[in-house]
Amino acid sequence: MKSSKIRRSIFSLTTIFSLIVFFVVTISPAFAAWAGFSQSTVSFGNGNQPLGVAAGDLNHDGNSDIVSAIASSGIGVSVILGNGHGQFSNPIYYTTGPGGYTGGVTISDVNGDGKPDIVAQVVTNNTALPCSTSTWVAVLLGNGDGTFQAPNFTCTKTTDTASDVLLGDLNHDSKLDLVVGGVGTGLNVFLGNGDGTFQAPTNYLGNDSTGFFVLKDFNGDGNLDIAASDDDAYPSGHIAVLLGKGDGTFQAPVMYGPLSSPGNITSVDFNGDGKLDLAVSDYQGDSVTTFMGNGDGTFSNQNTIQLPASSYPTGIAAADFNGDGKADIIVGGIFVNSYNEVGILPGNGDGTFQPVVPLSSTCCSSPQYIAVGDFNNDNLQDFVVTAMPTFGISIFQNQGSTQPLTLNLPSNITAYPTSSSGAAISYTVTTSGGTGTSTINCSPSSGSTFPIGTTTVNCSATDTGGGSASGSFQVTVVQPIALSLPANITTNATSPSGAIVTYTVSTSGGINPPPSVSCNPSPRSVFPIGTTTVNCTATDTAGHSVNGSFTITVTGAVGQVSNLITTVNSFHLPSGIQNSFDSQLQVVLADLNAGNTSQACIDLTSFINHVKSQSGKGLTVSQANQLLAAAQQVQVVLGC
């Protein structure tokens, strides 16, 4: 029978004294930004061997306290109260019954009065007191101030070793029920009466050895289930999973394995899929084995994490200890130098783990019990482990990050509007350093619609170790690109080819530097006689663009002669002179419309000579010069 793997020796008590020894050793595994743990010890005195250990707030002061079972005949449990700064009171001892030694221990409010109680499993070789079975569960009702009443007893099935005790509401009657394991006793379920006493047990797993188990809801149906290390499951050790029916009973067990000698067991989400997984120490297999939960109460992907030879792993616990958001495993064993130690298996977040890193070379002999808590209120996961060499417990306090919390902000953002309201801008802000997990808040938040103009984004971050950081960056939503185009242009041709036309186009808005502009035809091009559309495009460095156009009309000889007629009429000359000028220009116009350019040139010359003859007479000099310039311009256009 393999039950020797979870047996504990019974220590006789010859001297009782309490002594707190705080020696601090900083253990710093080789992780970039994590400082590891500091270790201290609370001593119970020679011969007072602790076994089970649990952490919780016993006196409602908001600080974690520690209860440890004492495997010395008649001692019972020790209570040490924390001050929230990682320091603890001297142990106070409470009996759990005459002549017994105490193993598994847990903290729960078993009578519903809002005050934490202590529940412990006790074994003795005295069949007379208080149970003929020589095994019982002691319930010490709490007074709410960290002190406890004398125990009442619930007799359990005979076992030769103390084991886990856990409580949970198995039948949804708002009363805590009790599950007790043991060597050769299977699992025994006691429904609670709500006053700290329990009904007769129901047995599961017969006489198998089930010293370690967890109560969790593995299939999400709201009912508590059991996963137990079954050291006697044929033909080798297995994990037995019993799904709860919600009425205090369980379905038939489903076995997972095999394992050489399954020991302590823990359950968290190791691969980040939101489903509970399992990890169990394997004493004879020198390993830790994980099973990934499927979320329906079944498990798969059994993976063995091999530890150094002859490491004999025992106690196990899981939490995110190094602050990377991934669950790690703490395991007790012998990893280097033949010393009893605890080590950390850093989680990769996908259900796999890095090699074990020892945290202490002289921690504790056969550290079968590990409890996780926050002992100094820094929001970091600490743990406590039973420690035989000093006959006490070793407390490992998480030192958190070696680097301050830092906000990693984006550079200032410049964006183009997507609507009249501005632009929806997404950005990423992360943290580095700090302790534990961090929370980031930014205002306006990523994905918000930022108005046109410059907005300052203010960000702050806090971590679970009390660190904080703040910073800001700017988001500028620029004005849309605008093209400033000239009005449509009309000009006279200056040659038979047309006219050289200069124009100016400007822009505003867009991403800096200012947008570039291209127009076709470009400024100072020769525009032919007639109307030409000029198309312009402005483009910024981000590729945003806007288009626009205007026209340039170049007036040819026909148009210019028509304009000359209009000019003559505007002078309001004596009718004889005006009619003579008008008649000459009408002749030129007729020549042009007939396509007779040479005759038009002759008739234009006659008009010019006539104007010269009337300069200072029928025409003012200014009027004559104006008509001459216009007529000579037409000659140039015609190539006369």
Image: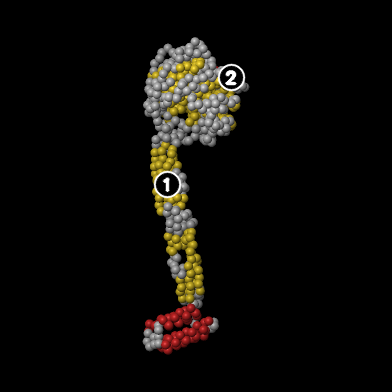
- Specify whether residue 44 is in view: no
Q: Look at the picture and state if 466 lies above or below 12.
A: below
Q: Amino acid at mark 2?
A: Gly
**Mark 1: few, some, or many residues within 10 Å (few <14, many ≥20)?**
some
Residue at the image point whose x is 40% and y is 84% from the top: 572
Mark 1 vs mark 2: in front? 2
Label ID, residue 383: none
The image's colour scheme reads secondary structure
Can you identify the residue that label 2 sits on? 206
Q: Quadrant of residue 481?
A: bottom left
- Numbered label tally: 2
* Mark 1 vs mark 2, CA separation in Å: 62 Å
Would residue 218 appear left or right of 613 to someone viewing this image? right
Which of the numbered marks, if any, corresponds to residue 444? 1
549 above or below 268? below
Q: Left of 294 or right of it: where is 111? A: left
Q: 365 or 30, which lies in front?
A: 365
Is residue 245 shown to the viewer in this render? Answer: yes
